[in-house]
Amino acid sequence: MIEGLEADVVIADKGYDSDNFVAAICASGANPVIPPRKNRSSPRDYDKALYKERNLVERAFQKFKHYRRIATRYERVAKHYTAMLNLVSTVIWLT
């Protein structure tokens, strides 16, 4: 899932807190920002302030899903889909 990913930080929720996944993130040179599960025997530290910014991205995706044309990927051509994303982003920004 993260092969070929070039990022400084990988932010994910608790569902992705596994030793293998975190090791793969570290091997790619990125810093994992994943809160540990409650039942983890040795909890890891993570950047809580950076993890809170994940909520902004989640809310943006929820706003996009209100537009059916985007949610169902009505546009089949990538150029047209990107144009619709830009249009919807502008409408969301203006409201």
Image (tube, rainbow, N blue to C red):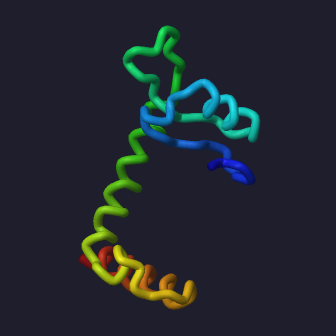
Res 94 quadrant in image: bottom left
Q: Residue furthest top?
A: 41
Foreground of the two, 12 or 71: 71
Q: Please name the residue shown 62% across and 49% down the image.
A: 1
Q: Is residue 35 above or below residue 28?
A: above
Q: Is residue 3 above or below residue 31?
A: below
The picture places residue 79, in percent across and down from the top left corner, at 56, 88
The picture places residue 6, in percent across and down from the top left corner, at 72, 52
Quadrant of the image containing the C terminus: bottom left
Q: Please name the residue shown 28% across and 78% down the image.
A: 67
Q: Is residue 63 left or right of residue 53?
A: left
Count of numbered circles in the view: 0
Q: Is residue 16 above or below residue 55?
A: above
Q: Please name the residue shown 33% across and 74% down the image.
A: 93
The picture places residue 72, in percent across and down from the top left corner, at 36, 77
Q: Is residue 72 left or right of residue 95?
A: right
Q: Please name the residue shown 25% across and 72% down the image.
A: 66
Foreground of the two, 21 or 55: 21
Q: Is residue 44 left or right of residue 66?
A: right
The picture places residue 10, in percent across and down from the top left corner, at 58, 43
